[in-house]
Structure formats: structure tokens, C-alpha cells
Amino acid sequence: MTAGDELTLFDSPAPAREVPVDDRLLRVRRIYAEPAAAASPRGRQVLGRFPDAELVEVPSHWQIPDLHGNAGNVDRWVRVKTETLVLGVKKSLSARPNERSSNWIAPSTANGCAMACAYCYVPRRKGYANPITVFTNIEQITGYLRRHVARQGPKTEPDQCDPVSWVYDIGENSDCSVDAVVSDNVADLIGTFRELPTAKASFATKYVNRRLLDLDPRGRTRVRFSLMPDADARLLDVRTSRIAERIAAVDDFVEAGYEVHLNLSPVVLREGWEADWAALLAHLDDALAPDTKAQAAAEVIFMTHNRDLHEVNLGWHPRAEDVLWRPEVQQPKRSQNGQWNVRYRNDVKRAGVDRLQELVAAHAPWLRVRYAF
């Protein structure tokens, strides 16, 4: 049954006319949808972009037995991300304080990803399958953000997030560059912050979506391109844009009106890591324009892994665990949600942070490190 056939079950009009998506990341064959999400304008837009997908009604985007907790999906990890979408309504709207990458974590407009980075923390919440869930009540979300920004008033003191603006991370649980392929949620968020002189949006990305260059952010959106040595990315950043492609896009995004920062993340400690990071930083120094360097800053984030995700990866990408799971240099850490994570031992991590900052100072001295942990 196609989306057009099953829409009668949702008692909603036909999807708005859209250009179908033909992307290597997405060959969507099935869309699970809450009825209200499918019937909404944003939901109809997504259905219009994937007109041949089967539409399956579900009571909640959290209650899909075929996806959540289905260990059999480990064998179909990438296929599920490629062929499946979920439409839901974001029911709880709140902005959480952050004070590290941003001042606030904005309410999510999506959850999950079509990419398959072996260390990603988002799958830990839903288990075994983590395709994109699009939240279709975008007007409620952007309205909430406008009101939240208004309540803050002007930022009166600079902080490490930004000297003058309140920063809202709009992509904590997804990659906004990929989300923008699926719907106009990201375009609406960028348009919202374009009109908010005291705030800016921020998101990290591993995917170069050049359609974002046409959205006229006027300096109110910060894109953080995640970078690591190419040898690490080819093993761990599955289905992402190559590192060279990300670096080649940085100047273009600055010219298009984005603030562009660099996430040196995650830093994976393995044999030869220092030489590979030195080479990457030297390449950045050669490749980026002076205007880009003048506005750049970096976040440095060392690898944190998860015991349950380690077990999942052994089922679909065991080679990644050769560098991610290293008990001899790692220690357990209980996360806020009760799961067991592993991170580098305090002494190992301290030495690694110091050494990477030395490499930045030597090869890219213009790159201000906002924080390193």
C-alpha cells in the first residue's frame, strides 16, 4: 500500500506537491506515522517527498515494536536508516540549560539519523534501530523558541558559548544537514533565528548539504563541522560526507552568512593519532580563508563510548570496536539516564587533551579552543 492509498485511513488531504528525494542516504520505503503527524502540513510535505513509501499508522513514535528494542535489526542497521522514517508530534517543549556547546538545548525537531557513526549516543535511547523521526508540529516549536528567547532578554555578560548572543543547540539528537533533506524544519528554524537579534541557532554536522547555502542565515546560525583524521572517519563515520568535503565547504558556508566553528570530535586515542591530527590541523591552516579563520573556534571532545552500543556494534561493525573499546585505557562512567558509558581514564584523557591543544597551537594557532574535554 502506498502513502497515497493509506492516507484515507488518516482522514487527511493528499500530500502537498514536492520534489521526490533521490539521495544516497535515503531510499525510504516505509514511514511510520502518528495520525496527527501524518495529517499536518509538515507531515504531508514529508510524505510528498517520498511518494512511494508505505505509510503505517502507529500510536506513538516511541511505540514501534518493529524498530525499538528489536535486536534483529542489528543485522539491518544501515538498511533501516536508509529505508525507514518516522513522523511524530513533539509533545513536551522545553529548553534545557547546557552552558558547554550552547546556552540552551532547544526542543528537538527530529530524532535519529540516516548516517551511522559507530560511536553515536542517540541509538542508546531507542535501541537497535535509529532512523530519522521528524516532529511535524514545527510551528509550536518555533513559537516556543521565540517566547523563550524573549524571556531571556539581552545577554549582559559574555560567556564561552558566545560573547553577545544566547546560543540554542537545535540538533542535539539528529544531524540538521540531513534533516533538511527530509523536511523544511531546519529551514524554518534558521528563518526563526534570523529574526532574533539576541539569539543564534547552533548545530554540529558531518554531512555537507549545500542547499543550506541558500537559506540566508545572516549570522544567526552557527554550523559546527565535525572533523577527525580521515583514517578515523573512514572507519567510524559511516555514511557521512568525507572529511575533505567537509573542509572544502567551510569557506562557502561562511560566505553564505553562517558562523562556522569546528568540532575536533571525537578524538580517538590509537597508535599514530598525534601525527594524523597534526596533518589535519596543518591542512586546515592551508585550506581555509583568512575571513574563515578570523571567526573560527573549536570544541575538542574525546571519545566516550557505551557498553550497550559496543554490543550492538559487534553485530554490524566489529572493526570499529578495535579502536572504540579499549578497556586498558578506559574507565566506566554512569550516565544521567543510568546507562554505563566508558571514557578514557582521567590521566590518559588529561594527557591527550594537553597534547591536542599543543598540536592546535603549533599547526593552527588561529583556532581558538572554546573548551576541551
Image (cartoon, rainbow, N blue to C red):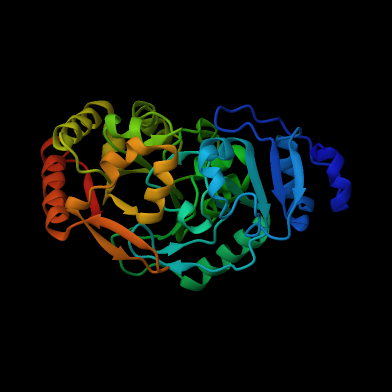
Horizontal arrangement in the rendering, residue 314 relative to residue 282 (left or right):
right
Q: From the image, which quarter does the C terminus lie in? A: bottom left
Q: State the residue at coordinates (39%, 42%).
A: 314
Residue closest to the eye, 286 or 150: 286
Q: x, y percentage for residue 178?
A: 53, 39
Please provide percent x and percent y for residue 150. 53, 69
In this picture, residue 151 sits left or right of residue 225: right
Tell me what residue is drawn at x 57 percent, y 46 percent.
186
- Residue 258 in view of the camera: no
Above or below — where is 243 with respect to 327? above
Quadrant in the picture for residue 291: top left
Whether residue 96 is visible: yes
| Image x and y of residue 354, in percent | 12, 51
Q: Is residue 104 above or below residue 136?
A: below
Q: Is residue 156 above or below residue 225?
A: below
Q: Is residue 72 left or right of residue 297?
A: right
Q: Residue at x 26, y 33 (%)?
A: 229
Q: Nearer the viewer, residue 256 or 56?
A: 56
